[in-house]
Amino acid sequence: MPELPEVETTRRGIEPALLGRTVTAVQVRQPALRWPVTASLASQLPGQRLLSVARRAKYLLLGADEGTVLVHLGMSGSLRVVPHAVPPAAHDHLDVVLDDGHCLRLRDPRRFGCVLWLTDAPAEHPLLASLGPEPLSAALTAEFLHARARGRRAPVKTFLMDGRVVAGLGNIYTSEALFRAGIHPLRPSSRISTGRYRDLVRGIRHTLEGAIESGGTSLRDFTRADGTPGYFRQRLLVYGRAGEPCPRCGAPVRSRVIAQRSTFYCPRCQR
DNA sequence: ACTGGCTCCTGAGGGC
DNA sequence: TGCCCTCAGGAGCCAG
């Protein structure tokens, strides 16, 4: 599932193929994504140049002359640049056709993703307006988290996955970051000191940066029709490892569902 | 202001 | 070998 590192890896992969290109057509084969792909995308985007490829949380923002394409990959989405002549496979829902014979192709079997055409300032769009700071930016500090946690009784796991607190920290990397910081996922967020939040901010950064780094190594596959960047399970310390020994102390890693999400942690190392 | 539950969809994986 | 069933999962949305 595309978490923030995978989205950033995607952004870096598609950016060079898109920048400066003019869109010649948008072909929508399946408009029923999380929200319907509106006809305005196919009617307005062609003829415009692509000027930027940015990311906010797990959203990708393709900046064009007179609007922005907002893309979310949901949990099964992927974007690749392929020659437009390559026939679409199952679940290839949409092509943004470019003037060099390639296209940006969206595949999303579960259709939890979205493709929206925005003509106003993206930052003011409801999906983006109330997002918290980027986890890799300087705006995410221990003091910020400590202040936001004030009065909140929810588990820190739930707190971290609230996009209004931190933008785009998904289920997998939340477990990983809490493990690195030695914080139990069920601990109420208001009962964590600024010092421990400092460990957590460090854990978040190390986890995400490491994942982006390893994602970068498979980047060369991005313009190939069959290129599917692997999933980096071998880099995960606790996620998906219930019953396996904790990499730090050897105690069995435990899993449990917190707020409808499977969560992995070491009951000995995390308090 | 928070919090927890529901929802969309389909592939994967377990059981038999 | 193959079929059927269950369920995970991002995150917006809503009710309490």
Image (cartoon, coloured by chain):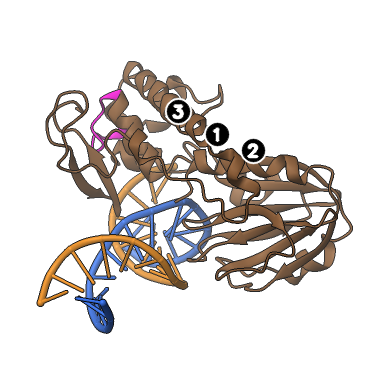
Chain colours: A brown, B orange, C blue
Instruction: Left or right? Give the position of A156 relative to A128.
Output: left
Asked whether residue A56 appears in the rendered view, the answer is no
Contact (Cβ within 8 Å) of mark 2 with mark 1: yes
Which residue occupies 23% across, 42% down? Answer: A241
Q: Quadrant of the C terminus of chain A?
A: top left
Which residue occupies 40% across, 42% down? Answer: A161
Pinpoint residue A113: horizontal percent, then vertical percent.
Answer: 55, 60
Q: Which residues are magenta?
A: A181-189
User: Residue A72: within the magenta?
Assistant: no
Q: Which mark is residue A84?
A: none
As shown in the figure, which amino acid type bears the numbered disc 1?
A: Gly
- Say yes or no: labels 1 and 3 on the same chain: yes
As shown in the figure, which amino acid type bears the numbered disc 2?
A: Arg
- Say yes or no: labels 2 and 1 on the same chain: yes
Return the disc, 2 or 3, that comes first in the chain's sequence.
2
Q: Which mark is residue A12?
A: 2
Q: Which residue is mark 1?
A: A216
Instruction: Left or right? Give the position of A91 relative to C8.
Output: right
Asked whether residue A16 appears in the rendered view, the answer is yes
Instruction: Left or right? Give the position of A13 relative to A215.
Output: right
Pinpoint residue A69: horizontal percent, then vertical percent.
Answer: 72, 54
As shown in the figure, which amino acid type bears the numbered disc 3?
A: Gly
Task: Examine the image and state in which quarter residue A139 appears.
Answer: top right
Real-space Cα distance between discs 2 and 1? Answer: 8 Å
Which residue occupies 45% across, 25% down? Answer: A205
Q: Chain of mark 1?
A: A
